[in-house]
Image: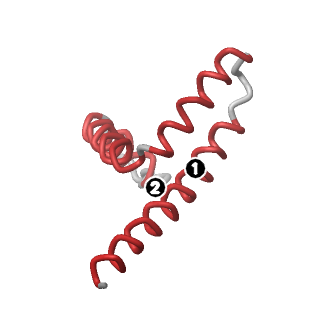
Amino acid sequence: MAQIFFIHLAIIVYLVMAYCFFNEWLGFFVADEDMDSEQRLFSTVILLLATILWPIVVPFAYLELLKFHKKHKQIINLLINPPKAGSYDD
């Protein structure tokens, strides 16, 4: 009985997360107006595959984000915490 409960719970969590990722990724997809019809078709297929395979896609995307952040850490810190006006050395 407990095993069936955990299987159903895992399926529900998987579907809820897939729905959340799909909605978020669809927002990025719709916002990109520079794609032609061929690119849009290819992107739609990728969007559907990424939504279905999100347990594999999300960790790899997070690793890429960490790598990007590590590479551009100084620039990101300057954008987050800009130097105050008038605080330069003479």
* Left-right relation of 29 to 59: right
Question: Against 56, is 44 above or below?
Answer: above
Question: Against 88, is 19 above or below?
Answer: below
Which label number is shown at residue 22? 1
Residue nearest the viewer, comparing 31 with 88: 31
For mark 1, give the secondary structure.
helix
Which label number is shown at residue 50? none
Q: Given this view, does label 1 or label 2 mark the residue nearer the observer?
A: 1
The residue that mark 2 highlights is 84
Residue 79 image position (x, y, % from top left): 45, 46
Q: Quadrant of the C terminus?
A: top left
Residue found at x 66% / y 23%? 41
**Label 2 amino acid?**
Lys
Q: Earlier in the sequence, mark 1 or mark 2?
A: 1
Residue, far bottom: 1
Residue found at x 31% / y 42%? 69
Residue 53 image position (x, y, % from top left): 41, 43
Residue 90 in view in this figure: no
Q: How many marks?
A: 2
Residue 7 image position (x, y, % from top left): 35, 70
Residue nearest the viewer, comparing 75 with 4: 4
Q: Quadrant of the N terminus?
A: bottom left
**Label 1 amino acid?**
Phe
For mark 2, give the secondary structure.
loop
* Left-right relation of 83 to 35: left
